[in-house]
Image (spheres, helix red, strand yellow):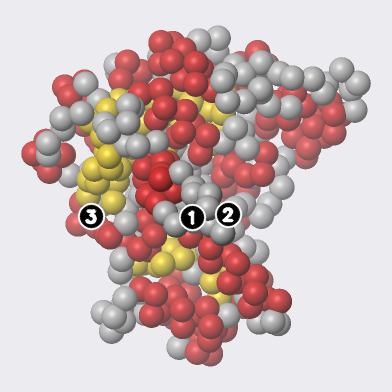
Amino acid sequence: MKANESGIRPAERLSSVQEYYFSRKGKEVARLNAEGYDIISLAIGSPDMPPSPQTIKTLCEEAQRPDAHGYQPTVGIPQLREAMAGFYSRWFGVELDPKTEIQPLIGSKEGILHVTLAFVNPGEKVLVPNPGYPTYTSLSKLLGCEIVNYNLRPENDWQPDFEELEQMDLTDVKLLWTNYPNMPTGARAQRATYEKLVDFARRHNIVVVNDNPYSFILGREHLSILQIPGAKDVCIEFNSMSKSHNMPGWRVGLLATNAEFVRWILKVKSNIDSGTFRPMQLAAAEAYRNDDAWHEEANINIYSRRRKLAGEIMNALGCVYDENQVGMFLWGRIPDSYADVEQLTEKVLHEARVFLTPGFIFGSNGSRYIRISLCAKEDKLAEALQRIKAVF
């Protein structure tokens, strides 16, 4: 990379990545808003509703304590680890030892970094889904890993093609990233897929990491890869409170796996951070105890109403989508009349003043798709629909 005026050069690793799409595009949207365009953003998956009242109450009460403000253990406080284990037992039927088989995280992005550092040497390979969460690729590149994409396709319900995986050169592959319920496609988790992934991991000595933050959004079936016998030996699962508990800014998540993997990851994490604010951990523990009624309203009812409006937006744009999607986005294929997806999304942005996500940012298999976020109030979705109808 070029030196600046002082002759200082950045690290070469920066040449392997670009600024995150939403960071870059967000600047343009901010400029348009400053010019009076009043852009409605249906792009980012940041829940716009609050956590449960008891969660906020616990944070406020605990933060008033004079002894609550010191450094905290990187492993997390026992109350949080026990709440996380209880959450997995209650909703997934998976029993975890809170002392040894759970590691609290400062969000899943942190977990991607720490797991990669713990398992992959520079030059070794990681299997990343196409389409998939861009951070699987960008962080791996920053750490000097070689990216090997595997395909997710609509004709296979956006599940891995295991025949194709078996034919790939798996030399030096250390990790396989997977994400169900899937983002960006909304494909549901399938027990058969989890069974095949566990078998694949065992036979090829590869660690499978399942990123599982969406199992509560628009779905009543809660699946975990750790439900599969033997999965804990070869798999790691992430779970985040951002989506399921309306806590994206809190940065609280977890990984669950066997005790040895946790110890390896803790070696990395303990050298990077100094724990999470204790009142936040106690409040998160309280959130894990939200009752069924809270989840039904926050994760099912509200998103169902929004999903209907998002479907009408897809229809207005002439896009085709699968009605069986779950998660907090709607994924749709654009009409063949457009040369590429940005021809559509830029028209929507500049003429209808609505910000949608082009699917190419998730990989080449998303290049003919758009993604609509459900993280907007119904009145905003309805207004976006009317603006789009006026243009299209």
Residue found 79% across the figure and 20% down from its top: 70
Residue found 52% across the figure and 53% down from its top: 7
Residue type indicated by callout 3: Arg
Residue 136 visible in the current orientation: no
Q: Is mark 1 on a helix, strand or loop?
A: loop
Q: What element carries label 3?
A: loop
Q: Quadrant of residue 274?
A: top right
Q: What label sits on residue 153 in the rendered view?
A: 3
Residue found 50% across the figure and 89% down from its top: 391
Mark 2 residue crowding within 10 angstroms, few (<14) / some (14–19) / many (20+): few
Where is the N terminus found, in terms of image quarters? bottom left
Mark 3 residue crowding within 10 angstroms, few (<14) / some (14–19) / many (20+): some
Q: Would residue 5 be found to the left or right of residue 50 on screen?
A: left
Residue found 38% across the figure and 80% down from its top: 343
Residue 194, image x and y in percent? 28, 32
Q: In which quarter of the image is residue 104?
A: top right
Cα separation, mark 1 vs mark 3, equals 42 Å
Q: Is mark 2 on a helix, strand or loop?
A: loop
How many numbered marks does the figure carry? 3
Q: Would residue 157 be found to the left or right of residue 304 on screen?
A: left
Residue where numbered disc 1 is placed: 3
Residue 311, image x and y in percent? 45, 69
Residue type indicated by callout 2: Ser
Question: CB of mark 2 within 8 Å of CB of mark 1?
Answer: yes
Residue where numbered disc 2 is placed: 6
- The earlier-in-sequence mark between 1 and 3 is 1
Cα separation, mark 2 vs mark 1, equals 7 Å
Q: Would residue 302 be found to the left or right of residue 138 on screen?
A: right
Residue type indicated by callout 1: Ala
Where is the C terminus found, in terms of image quarters? bottom left
